[in-house]
Image (cartoon, rainbow, N blue to C red):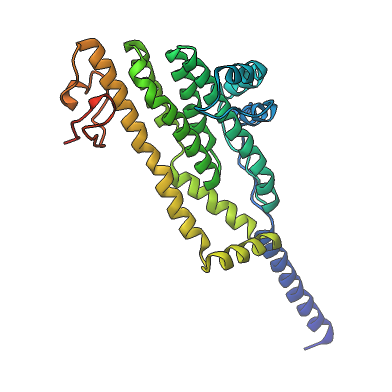
Amino acid sequence: MKPVRRIRIFLLIGGLVLAAGLFMGYFFFQPPEPEPLPHPNGYDDFVAAGEMLKGEVPGEKTGTLEECRQFVSANREALARGRLGLAKECRVPTEYSSTWLQRHLNQIMATRKLGHAFCVEGELAMLEKRPGDAASNYLTVIKMGARLGHGGLMIDGLIATACEEEGAIFLEPEVGTLDIEQSRKLIAELEKVESEQEPSAQIIKHEKKWVRAVLRSFDGIKMFVSEAAATRSLNPAQTEQKNFLARYEARLQWALQLKAKLAARAYALEQGRLSASWNDLVPAYLKSVPNVPFGPGDTNRLSFKAD
């Protein structure tokens, strides 16, 4: 083989190797394009509102009437900004880097603080004997929670669940104070909340995509090694996913129970007697029989069980 021809072959092979190396480098270290965000984005309103809040949030169920009044009065602008987000499409602005996750934790803290603030607003309404307004405030927390998981990771799904649980815990004791119209309205609103939930499978899909992207960086590899060492597992995400699914899916239980109790309340007010079976509530008050049992001592004496 002539030297010139040999050199050309070497150059060709070298070029192919270089091209393959550049391609692999791009594939492994170039993060995927971020998913498009709605404009305007309700998530931005939730974060901004949480950051706008002034002063310490009074203890829920422990704050005095005056403390709640002062806090709500000082933060009316922030609370109004938070409500703006409910009227917009919402999506977590995810970035594919480990440094973003640290910044994102501050956003999460802001949204949780906003949820607490809405609960204080509901507490104030309750102390002022305005049960309808109190229920509306607690529903706001539930509705916000239903949006916080959209486009996010498992940590966002858990924050969404925490907000919904908080709103439900405060709303449930108010069921017995509501009138027929308020009860029916809340049932319809909770039906809408269910339809707006981000499926758990979609959140896990986002999580896996984010992890794959982050592992293309040295910081991501270091983070994986650290988590593997802490969990003593080569698949640290497996346990996290299992715990996430258990917590995230559990929210469906309380949502069904809350709707059933509201339906029982509306029935009792309209009919003048307690409901005796699901046939009394379906389909006049509920679309279908919820697959959840209620014990004899449960709220509204809802003692029958799903067949």
Residue 273 vertical placement versus 31 (above, below): above
4 w.r.t. 26: above or below:
below
Q: Position of residue 258 (x, y in %)?
A: 34, 28
Where residue 49 appears, x then y in whole percent? 65, 26
- Identify the image quadrant of residue 29: bottom right
- Which residue extends farthest bottom? 1
In the rendered image, the residue lying farthest to the right is 4
Q: Nearer the viewer, residue 209 or 99?
A: 99
Left or right, 126 with respect to 81, comes to: left
The N terminus sits in image quarter = bottom right
Residue name at image x 81 percent, y 87 percent: 2
Which quadrant holds the C terminus?
top left
Question: Is 163 placed left or right of 49 in the picture?
Answer: left
96 left or right, relative to 307 = right
Residue 211 x/y as whole percent: 58, 55
Question: Which of these two is toward me, 34 or 217?
Answer: 217
Q: Is residue 4 above or below residue 126?
A: below
State the image coordinates of residue 195 (x, y, percent, origin top left): 41, 30
